[in-house]
Amino acid sequence: MLPGHAAEPTQDGFRAWVASFRQTALDAGVKPEIYDRVTRPLTADFSLPDLDIGNRKSKGEQPEFVRTPEQYVSEKQMASLLVKGRDLAARHEKVLADLKKRYDVDPYIMLGLWGRETAFGTQHDGYSGLRVLATQAYIGRRAELFQKQFVDALKMVQIGAITPENFKTSWAGAFGLVQFMPTDYLKYAVEPDGRKLDIWNKVPDALTALARNLHAIGWNAREPWGFEVRAPEGVDCSLGYLDVTKSVAEWERLGVRPLKGERFPDAVRGFEVSLLQPAGIYGPAFLTTQNFQAIREYNKSDLYALYVAHLADRIRGQGPFAKGWEPIRQVHTADVEFLQKRLTGLGLYADTVDGKAGGRTRAAVGAYQKRAGLPLTCWPTEAIVAHVKANAGKATLNERQ
């Protein structure tokens, strides 16, 4: 690990880190000749996002955190992908049916993940994967995580899964049709007899590895990922994040209703679900099961999981969301960070200060609105930022209730 993280790391510093990390990799099972051969030509790429380099701003923010929900779950893009997805569902029907039987997973969710990750293989990785992983392991904000990934990437080269020259990834180190990380590849894409699945070029191999992954992280074939609902105007949107679970019947008692009718079917009333309102009160609402959390294992974003789930449903034959998105805008990242820090001080927020309007942030905004006697919207706006700043010293708002 890089001691103290220098404000401006250098290529010489990177080479020193490579030398110091050698024993760690060897202790984990990487052969000395593999480590030396792979790392000898490597240089660090300091242009990558998410590096811990002083106060320098990262480039290439993930779209789920810089777009509004409507922009991210784009109907135009969805319409384009579902045509391709339905064609692939028919073309690989036998493979998908077999995987559903063997691993008890939803084939449409697999298609949704494939579509979201690489637009069904039409978006290609263009970074040198070993360089990406080594740079992130050296000076990334999540260096410890990437050190494990770098070791496992070296193991992939060692077992002949990929050559260093052909090891292309995204800027975040993911690769293949379904964007695995090296640790996932070693877990789910290496057969007991040693055969390596080709998740780069062979669709059945990529889907097999993906099905194993979904099964391992607890996909429950007896439940859907969730479903759109009608949330009443006065619903407590501050409860709308994934840490809060209630039965469907309990949400119904709080006023949440199915899209049609006033009562949920008996078959779903016992499901433990969370209320999701990705745009606060300004868009569609959903009740989500543990399967939604399984999708989030691929990317810790509500919008990412919603995109995958909705694309799966569209390929399955369902239509657009029943409720449209109202016009909203994202406030600046710095303003969201300010809210997160202030709401933390008020005892309303207890998560990472990252400038992202995720579920816990939206819920904390709603909790603040309740405490301040404001209309509940659960969406960070410039008006909320201004209110928090103007009322920073008021005792009633500072009380931890």
Image: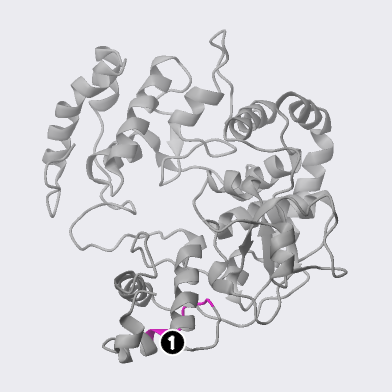
Badge count:
1
Q: Residue furthest right?
A: 261
Q: Position of residue 353 (x, y in %)?
A: 33, 64
Quarter of the image where one finds residue 212: top right
Q: Nearer the viewer, residue 166 or 391?
A: 391
Q: Residue furthest bottom?
A: 390
Residue 321 image point, x, y percent: 75, 67
> Is 382 contained in the magenta span?
yes
Q: Is residue 49 left or right of residue 282?
A: left
Q: Is residue 281 above or below residue 171?
A: below
Q: Residue at x 74, y 39 (%)?
A: 106
The foreground one among 122 and 251 is: 251
Reading the image, the residue beneath label 1 is 372
Name the residue rendered at 61%, 28% in the picture. Answer: 209
Q: Report the amino acid beneath label 1.
A: Ala
Given residues 44 and 337, the one toward you in this image is 337
Q: Residues within 10 Å of mark 1 (few under 14, many from 20)?
A: some
Q: Quadrant of the N terminus?
A: top left
- In the rendered view, does 21 fall on the left or right side of 159? left
Judged from the image, the secondary structure of the residue bearing numbered disc 1 is helix
Residue in the picture at 47% in, 82% down? 369
**Camera-nearest residue between 24 and 157:** 24
Residue 41 within the magenta-colored segment of the rendering: no
Residue 184 seen anywhere in this rendered image of the structure: yes
Q: Is residue 324 above or below residue 384?
A: above
Q: Which residues are magenta?
A: 378-385
In the picture shown, does residue 179 fall above or below 245?
A: above
